Image (cartoon, rainbow, N blue to C red):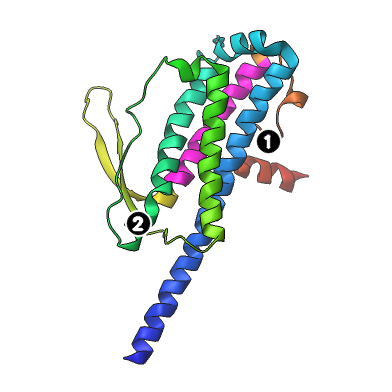
């Protein structure tokens, strides 16, 4: 019995260790993306001034068919939701309970967060603080967040059917999804910056709108 218990405890320790690595990775990725978003807004203000930067934030790019603000708001709706669920995961994961539901397609379109550059920046900063708090919790060894922390995510998957489809997932998987999702929106923002709001390639934050896999591939090419 003692050998069985020892093996079980060791197994739990390994799972917790691997989960911590995973959480650190997805938190790091999301923080890097949020930092890039903030850096771009600060660049717009420093280059154009507050009034023109606000206009640039809302300006629709004819190529993309949307504004920086719209892409920021959309991707942040996802990231903020997943971050808040992750910050609430501690108690649920301790008991392997279902944590909650994530309804990604229940979003407010056309509101202040896609039109007000100041409010958008504040939102970015606030969500960054949530991720930093998660990191501090992990560093303090006070978290029981594991890869098994379950959530259910809901999407509209067909334009001719308004019902949502629920899919089983985990906290870490959703944080990874949100980072991946945000990068694709930043790729659109990159086009808007270069084609519509008067920025050039050299001014953009390093790696802005480029997937890690693309950057790694380019490095291999030298």
Image quarter in which the C terminus is found: top right
Is residue 116 in view? Answer: yes
Q: Position of residue 85 (x, y in %)?
A: 38, 44
Q: Which residue is mark 1?
A: 207
Is residue 197 in view? Answer: no
Q: Which residues are magenta?
A: 174-194
Earlier in the chain: of badge 2 and badge 1, it is 2
Instruction: Please tell me in which quadrant of the rendered image residue 208 appears.
Output: top right
Distance Cα–Cα, label 2 vs label 1: 36 Å
Residues at marks 2 and 1 touching, judged by CB atoms closer than 8 Å: no
Magenta-drawn stretch contains 51: no
Q: Position of residue 184 (x, y in %)?
A: 53, 31
Dot 1 falls on a residue whose secondary structure is loop
Q: How many marks?
A: 2
Question: Which mark identifies residue 12?
Answer: none
Q: Position of residue 146 (x, y in %)?
A: 41, 60
- Residue at image position (72%, 48%) is 220
In the image shown, does 143 or 106 lie closer to the viewer?
143
- Residue at image position (43%, 47%) is 87
What secondary structure do most residues of the magenta stretch adopt? helix
Instruction: Please tell me in which quadrant of the rendered image residue 104 appears.
Output: top left
Please tell me how crowded label 1 is: few (under 14), some (14-19), or many (20+) other residues with Cα within 10 Å.
few
Q: Which residue is mark 2?
A: 91
Q: Is residue 87 above or below residue 147?
A: above
- Residue at image position (42%, 76%) is 11
- In the displayed structure, does residue 118 sit left or right of residue 162? right
- Residue at image position (55%, 27%) is 122
């Amino acid at each position: 019995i003692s050998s069985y218990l020892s093996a079980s405890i060791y197994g739990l320790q390994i799972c917790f260790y691997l989960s911590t690595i995973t959480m650190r990775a997805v938190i790091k990725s999301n923080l890097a993306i949020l930092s890039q978003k903030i850096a771009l807004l600060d660049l717009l203000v420093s280059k154009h001034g507050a009034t023109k930067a606000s206009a640039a934030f809302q300006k629709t790019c004819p190529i993309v068919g949307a504004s920086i603000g719209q892409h920021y708001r959309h991707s942040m709706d996802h990231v903020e939701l997943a971050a808040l669920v992750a910050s609430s995961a501690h108690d649920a994961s301790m008991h392997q309970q279902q944590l909650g539901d994530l309804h990604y397609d229940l979003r407010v379109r056309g509101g202040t967060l896609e039109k007000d550059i100041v409010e958008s920046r504040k939102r970015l900063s606030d969500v960054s603080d949530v991720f930093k708090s998660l990191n501090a919790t992990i560093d303090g060894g006070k978290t029981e967040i594991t890869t098994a922390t379950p959530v259910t995510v809901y999407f509209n998957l067909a334009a001719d059917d308004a019902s949502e489809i629920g899919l089983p997932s985990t906290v870490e998987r959703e944080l990874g999804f949100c980072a991946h999702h945000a990068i694709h929106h930043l790729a659109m923002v990159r086009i808007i910056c270069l084609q519509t709001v008067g920025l050039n390639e050299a001014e953009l934050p390093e790696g802005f709108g480029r997937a890690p896999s693309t950057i790694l591939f380019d490095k291999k090419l030298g």
